[in-house]
Structures are given as C-alpha cells and as structure tokens.
Image (spheres, rainbow, N blue to C red):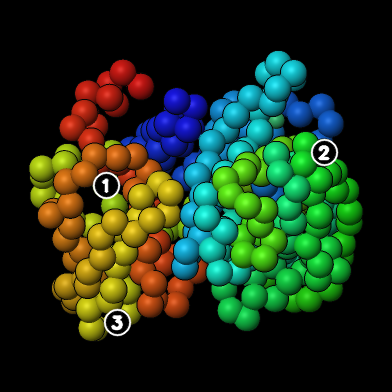
Amino acid sequence: MKFRRSICTAVLLAVLLTLLVPTSVFALEDNSSTLPPYKNDLLYERTFDEGLCYPWHTCEDSGGKCSFDVVDVPGQPGNKAFAVTVLDKGQNRWRVQMRHRGLTLEQGHTYRVRLKIWADASCKVYIKIGQMAEPYAEYWNNKWSPYTLTAGKVLEIDETFVMDKPTDDTCEFTFHLGGELAATPPYTVYLDDVSLYDPEYTKPVEYILPQPDVRVNQVGYLPEGKKVATVVCNSTQPVKWQLKNAAGVVVLEGYTEPKGLDKDSQDYVHWLDFSDFATEGIGYYFELPTVNSPTNYSHPFDIRKDIYTQMKYDA
Ligand SMILES: [Ca+2]
C-alpha cells in the first residue's frame, strides 16, 4: 500500500536520522519544473510525486473522520497527489483537516501561495495560513470565505500576501474540510503542487524539527514488550495523554507519572507507560491534550513484531 510505504518511509527516515543526527531531518528536494525553487519554499513536501506526504498530515476531531493516502493522478504518469477521504464530516469545518505545521512567517516578507485542489464531489474547503493554536490569527485566507469546489474540476490558487504582523513561528497551512463545508461522505479531496514561496527565505539544508514533548523510541515498540515514553513537561502533577492511530483516532489514554528533574537535561520529566496496548500498527503518535505547548505531541512510531527485522530490510 502506498499509504503504508509513505508512512514507513517517513518513519524510517526519522529512525535513521535519530540514529545518525538526533532530531534532524534532511530536506528532500523535489524536481518541480513549475513551482518556485524548493530551497526558498517554506513547505517540505510540495508535489507528493515520491509517494511521500510528510510533514503533511490529517486531523480529525469530535465526530470528524477521514483517511489519507498518496495516490496516482489518473492520466498523468508519474504525478501523485495527497488524497484525503472524508468519512464523517463532524460538527464543524475544522473537525476534518489536512495541514502542514511548523511554519514561521516573517514580518514584512511577501509570500506567494500556490496550490491545486480538486474533489470527486462538489464541496467547500476553507484554506488558511495562520496560527496553529489560540488565538488562531489568520495571515492568509480567501477573504474569510471557503472556496467552492466543483466535482472533478481543479481549482488553482496563485496569490501573494505580505506578512504585516510581527514574525510568528507558530504557523500552519491548513485546509478545513468538515462540518458545513463537506459534501455527503465518503468523498475524496486531492491536493498537489502546493507551495509557500518567500524569495527572502532559504530553507536550512538540515531542517531541525522541534523536539516534541513526548519522546518515543522511533525504532518502534514490540506489541508484547514494555512500552514507555518520556514526557518533558513543567507540571509537577500527572498530565493526560492520548495515544492516537495514524488516522488520528484515540486508541488509549491515561495520565503520566511525574518523575522529577532530570539533572542531565535540566528538564522536568514524566513517565508514560502504555505497555498494556499491544495492537500492531504504524504511525501511532501521542498527544497531550491539556498541555498548552506547540510541541505537545510525539513523533510517529510503529508497534510491530518485526520492527528490528524490518529495519534491516529497509536499510
Ligand atoms: Ca504531484
């Protein structure tokens, strides 16, 4: 499955780089002939043509449900697109999202936004670039209105905007698909050739991912083994954690066990024991729903019997 390959490749990349250069991910340059230079683009995946979508991901909440994949675009050999299938539209538009986080918009810079989006059912989509947490300031959108998609027809967006607010490093590029905007599920929305270009910006050759608050073993965990993650958190009280599967569905939740100050790192650490969870799967991740931090999550990881043998094959 392409989805599995995409996730596995992303996880493998993270694993290898964890072993080699902790917390670093190298930019995978695309060869797009139509988009601006990759090195001046804030986005790390623009064309999906290698079958990868990371760091694009989906988010579902309060009744919203979706699945995602990287799929071939019919009639265009070699061209792939990010595909999000809306399975349940949820209570409102942000209950189903696809998004790219970790963006910094710099005051006074001019940004060019480009993308192609289409769907196999007529629907609406609200697209914005703005803060990923409260107060959710929006720096670019379609004049506060959703776009209307006509089934099977590609909508191309090519706009520029100036960041006229102070530099903000808490931004995301997100697409709201749920609630009142949705067609009757299931249907699929496709994204391709997406770009956020700033000629004044140069992408670091080595992209330093923000270290998540929940530190997991990115090689993965054995289903029947002891499974512990470390949580870095200032709270001296237990904090709530949620284990989610690749589709964003909560599969287990609990509270951390505060362990005190780690003298080496000077971090206050908690233990998160999820040994009771033995269901094999790929792309699990943690979230700390009550922790108000932009990194209140973990990197994705697998729970599989063959984590160690699989690594040998992949490497
Ligand atoms: Ca493509």
Q: Secondary structure at mark 1?
A: loop
Quarter holding residue 256: bottom left
Q: Residue at x 70, y 76 (%)?
A: 137
Q: Which residue is mark 3?
A: 235
**Tag 2: residue type?**
Lys
Q: Residue at x 18, y 52 (%)?
A: 277
Look at the picture and state if 64 lies above or below 247.
Answer: below
**Tag 3: residue type?**
Ser
The local crowd at label 3, few if under 14, some if 14 to 19, many if 20 or more residues have their Cα within 10 Å, is: few
In the image shown, does 116 or 297 lie closer to the viewer?
116
Asked if residue 208 shows in the view, the reply is: no
Q: Residue at x 22, y 69 (%)?
A: 254
Q: Which badge, 1 or 3, comes first in the chain's sequence?
A: 1
Whether residue 183 sits left or right of residue 25 in the image: it is right
Look at the picture and state if 34 lies above or below 65.
Answer: above
Asked if residue 73 shows in the view, the reply is: yes
Residue 31: image location, x then y, percent:
72, 26
Q: Which residue is mark 2?
A: 153
Q: Which residue is mark 1?
A: 217
